[in-house]
Amino acid sequence: MATERGGALPRVVILGAGFGGLSAAKALRNAPCDVVVIDRRNYHLFQPLLYQVATAALSPAEIASPIRSILSRQKNARVLMARVTGVDAQRKLVNLERGRDEPFDYLIVATGARHAYFGHDDWAKSAPGLKKIEDATDIRRRILLAFERAETTDDADERKALLTFVVIGGGATGVEMAGAIAEVAHWALADEFRVIDPTQARVILVEAGPRLLPAFPADLAEHARKALEKLGVEVHLGRAVEHCDDNGIVYGGERLAARTIVWGAGVQASPAAKWLDVDKDRAGRVVVAKDLTAPGHAEIFVVGDTAAVLDGKGQPVPGIAPAAKQMGAYAARVIFARLAGSEPPGPFRYRHAGSLATIGRSAAIADFGWLKVTGWLAWWLWGIAHIYFLIDFRSRFIVAMQWFWSYLTFRRGARLITGTEADV
Amino acid sequence: MATERGGALPRVVILGAGFGGLSAAKALRNAPCDVVVIDRRNYHLFQPLLYQVATAALSPAEIASPIRSILSRQKNARVLMARVTGVDAQRKLVNLERGRDEPFDYLIVATGARHAYFGHDDWAKSAPGLKKIEDATDIRRRILLAFERAETTDDADERKALLTFVVIGGGATGVEMAGAIAEVAHWALADEFRVIDPTQARVILVEAGPRLLPAFPADLAEHARKALEKLGVEVHLGRAVEHCDDNGIVYGGERLAARTIVWGAGVQASPAAKWLDVDKDRAGRVVVAKDLTAPGHAEIFVVGDTAAVLDGKGQPVPGIAPAAKQMGAYAARVIFARLAGSEPPGPFRYRHAGSLATIGRSAAIADFGWLKVTGWLAWWLWGIAHIYFLIDFRSRFIVAMQWFWSYLTFRRGARLITGTEADV
């Protein structure tokens, strides 16, 4: 049993209330310990649908739930909204930006990942990525504002650049963003302008590798490429982006004038490896032991996008929500066993339930290993799965209604240009 | 018939797509003219429900609809997202911040009002008002962040100040804000904190005048005061606020420590009077003629919160949505008649349909002149009226669902702390 202080219960501190952190907290519901969940946000974000906020289909609150609400009935859980600045592994303290350090007996680090620019951080300003609510409303503003400005400009070149949308990166985020931007241009805005024709907008998806969606089988990825092209997206494979700025990109030696660029090309783990002073892989993830503990720290677990783990076949566990949930629940089981003095579970084993990606209206791909599905059936599977996994009943219902409405009308319900840039 | 340029139809330019501007645009649907609606936002905002965004009950997109969508089927209407910098009445041009001037034959100015600090503009930083979406998400952030910070602070005085919420101004905005903040503290957050007890939060409504809601009969205003006190709001009448800063307010010579202050005490019209170089009243509104034209400008109409108009009894027409709609539609009728060369309508006559204000769950007041209603019946009337007047079907449905869910669960669906301050 872990160190107790003055008869108090052992403290399990969880950093991050994403999929990994929350699933750990919930799995400790009946454990003989106090659980403290620390996040710099007051909400859990359903990141798989963030691109729908960026493309005006959903509102932020529809994919975000207050962490306090989620855990309000779990009596052994406390929620702290605070920014973590470091971990003192020796003294078992989490350092916070404001207020006291938080002591722990067990620590679960589930602080996720951020998009990365591979040494080109100056591209961030021109090519925002998509990880936070603010990223999504920023991208939404850029996309909608580009159409508005194209409508008012007299300069033909400027209009062309405003109506050129570039998405960098052919992973799931890039594919979903490109498809959704094309839908906005070709359907949602189609009849609403008098000078420009939004259906003439160019949407360009650039991927440095030879194919889209490396996590999917080649035939499904090819299906996705064709579905994107059917939506009017130009897919450029095998061309690395060499430069980004406010005027556009340079790729394959060629300049492309574009006012709106979205970055979906890479992620970098949170600084957990630095906090713990342990080895990390190229993406900054902590290389954890088979029980998900950090090397040399039997009481510190690292889960989700912050951890580098191999599955049974020696392949890296993907950075997706189900993987993070499994890791969080596993770390909680190990801690529970140690607290109870019972047999610890065997090494972490990732169970891949399947991969899903959506391209646009009635187009998606699904890979369950034993079964591959494309087209409208995959699209319905995708929709049902995402509604099912939304964390609260209200969100599920409201998102289902928004989608139903969009499906019937071809419109998008959250077309707001908000924030400082909107003060034009 | 107005001047035509090169065979083109006469141009009616409408500044502002609030209730007044949109109702004018729609009333010109079949008029022999081109209609240009200019707004610096891309959406029409249903301001009467803005306080529900500020108190986490609704999402911004649920009370905002893209102006282009609203007018997409009106073939003679064009929408321009641009900021107006002035009006050249002589040359009949509207000056825009970016791009060409917009020529007009007729102009309808419907640019609304902004909150005003009566010469204390430095109070704005500490006591934000509620007119824009960004105001609402800013106030929501302040309210929710105050509870989060109270939970983490060790300083008892600081905790007390964080849990003290001051609303300045006893008009409809102030009453609705105070009631809604009390509901957030006493119901929505009640069981979610472990250190503080949100139900102990103080909500204080300060009004300089002798009573609340001067637009309502005294007995209804008194009913509202009692309903607020039942919700736990402290109502302080007859005490003017002498100072506001980040530490709280000074009122009646007394200092009150509070970290969250909301301003609902006064409005100032948009700078239309300055643009047109005509007389304005104390609130900056253009004193218009009986046909709502600006003095000396037969082709320029001023409507809504930007216009000072008297009703049949010599009372000022109130700054509410139905009044703005009536003025917009009236100005359109005058223009239509002039374009058609037919008899112009008589002077503008305001028809007051009734006044509604809500205090909280199952509590509201309604005054129809011939009938006064209070309590749950008024609350249902208020809810049905507001859903009915929401501009699009999607919003109506989603808002109804959100309210229904909140009513059943006592929870609030949009409890997001977003924006720069959230990066704690």
Image: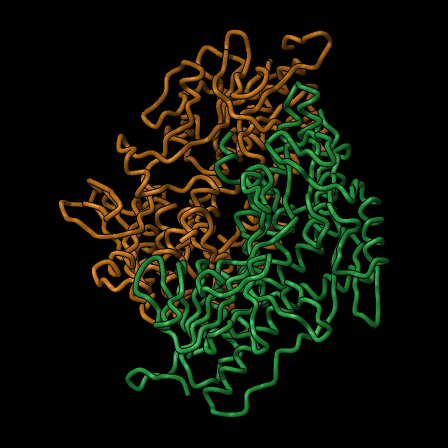
Chain colours: A green, B orange
Among all residues in the image, which is located at the extreme bottom? A342
Rendering coords of residue B87 (x, y %)? 49, 15
Rendering coords of residue A209 (x, y %)? 75, 49
Rendering coords of residue A45 (x, y %)? 55, 60
Q: In this rendering, is residue A300 above or below B218?
A: below
Q: Is residue B325 visible?
A: no
Lateral position of residue B419 relative to residue A191, left or right: left
Q: Residue at x 37, y 16 (%)?
A: B279
Q: Residue at x 84, y 60 (%)?
A: A374
Lateral position of residue A23 relative to residue B205, left or right: right
Task: Pick the residue in front: A147 or A260.
Answer: A260
Q: Residue at x 40, y 70 (%)?
A: A89
Res B73 quadrant in image: top right
Q: In this rendering, is residue A384 above or below A34?
A: above
In which quadrant will I find the N terminus of chain B?
top right
Task: Pick the residue in front: B121 or B307.
Answer: B121
Q: Is residue A239 visible?
A: yes
Among all residues in the image, which is located at the extreme left? B253
Task: Pick the residue in front: B311 or B381.
Answer: B381
Q: Residue at x 40, y 21 (%)?
A: B287
Rendering coords of residue A270 (x, y %)? 51, 58
Res B8 quadrant in image: top right
